[in-house]
Amino acid sequence: MAKVFTSGGVAIITGGASGIGLALAKKCHGYGMRVLIADKNETSLESARNALNGDIAVFKMDVGRLEDWSELKASVDRDFAGRVNLLALNAGMGVRGASWDNTAAFQSTLQTNFMGIVNGISTLLPLVKQSAAAGDYASIVITGSKQGITNPPGNPAYNASKAAVKAVAEHLSWDLRAEERISVHLLIPGWTFTGMTNRAGPDAPKPDGAWWPEQVVDYLEEKMKEGQFWVLCPDNEVTESLDRRRILWTAGDIVKGRPPLSRWREDWKARAQEGIDGMGDPAQK
């Protein structure tokens, strides 16, 4: 589905003012696409527009608010004739240290990370289908997280939101399986150096183990060319093979009746590591 990256096509990217979203906007712009980035941070939106020489459209919105999506759709109808070739539902947030008694953190995280996806699909999927029916190719990219699959302890609100995103993306791919001109992709970044993941301050250097957002976007394009739904990104510390083995071990907690999150339990850590290290690459079996 690299055919979506064509001059004159339209890309709509939420959370597009920084990080992976901005890197994707730059890639689309480089292909000659018309780009609209949506974000709730007005200052970041202006910085992003300046970074692309003012040659993109920006839209301030909260993806968790359905009414904001209605306004965005009206803008796409007006300014882009309702055309959508790439819909990247990328906006996300995380509340550090969210605890069980902080229900507001759960609500805000789910509203952005989960309902932001659902709102985007329900509002703009008709335009994606309309574009495909007119002869265009179209792709929907949904940004998930490895934390929504392996569920490491420490942030249940974020993990739950990304687990729900995975489920929605799978269902969307199923529902659109007969659409020959529309593809769906779940982007699952590895350790990526962005404002959201940087814990050391705005001037801190990129850790050696992390990827730049541009590397993630290049990998996304490669997997889209291959027709892959699962875009399981490595980084400079974790290979795809290791990710697959960790995911398989996690699924084994259910299948084998182990305690949940066994990989992190003190009485299971050594066995989990031994089991993961001893697996061959599941993709090669």
Image: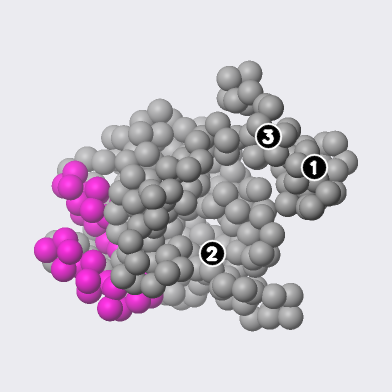
Give the position of the C terminus as an image quadrant: top right
Classed neighbour count for the residue bearing mark 3: other residues with Cα under 10 Å, few (<14), some (14–19), many (≥20): many
The numbered mark at residue 276 is 3
Q: Is residue 28 left or right of residue 281?
A: left
- What's under tag 2, amino acid-wise? Asn
Classify 231 as above or below 152.
above
Q: Is residue 79 left or right of residue 162?
A: left
Q: Which numbered disc, 2 or 3, marks the residue that appears first in the sequence?
A: 2
Classed neighbour count for the residue bearing mark 2: other residues with Cα under 10 Å, few (<14), some (14–19), many (≥20): many
Q: Which numbered disc, 3 or 1, marks the residue that appears first in the sequence?
A: 1
Q: Which residues are magenta?
A: 24-53
Q: Tag 1, which secondary structure? A: helix
Q: Residue 247 in the image: x percent, y percent?
A: 65, 40
Q: Camera-side residue: 49 or 276?
A: 276
Residue extending farthest top: 285
Labels 1 and 2 touching (C-beta < 8 A)? no
Does residue 129 show up?
no
Q: Residue 280 in the image: x percent, y percent?
A: 63, 23
Residue for badge 1: 253
Q: Camera-side residue: 146 or 86?
A: 146
- What's under tag 1, amino acid-wise? Asp
Q: Nearer the viewer, mark 2 or mark 3?
A: 3
- What's under tag 3, amino acid-wise? Ile
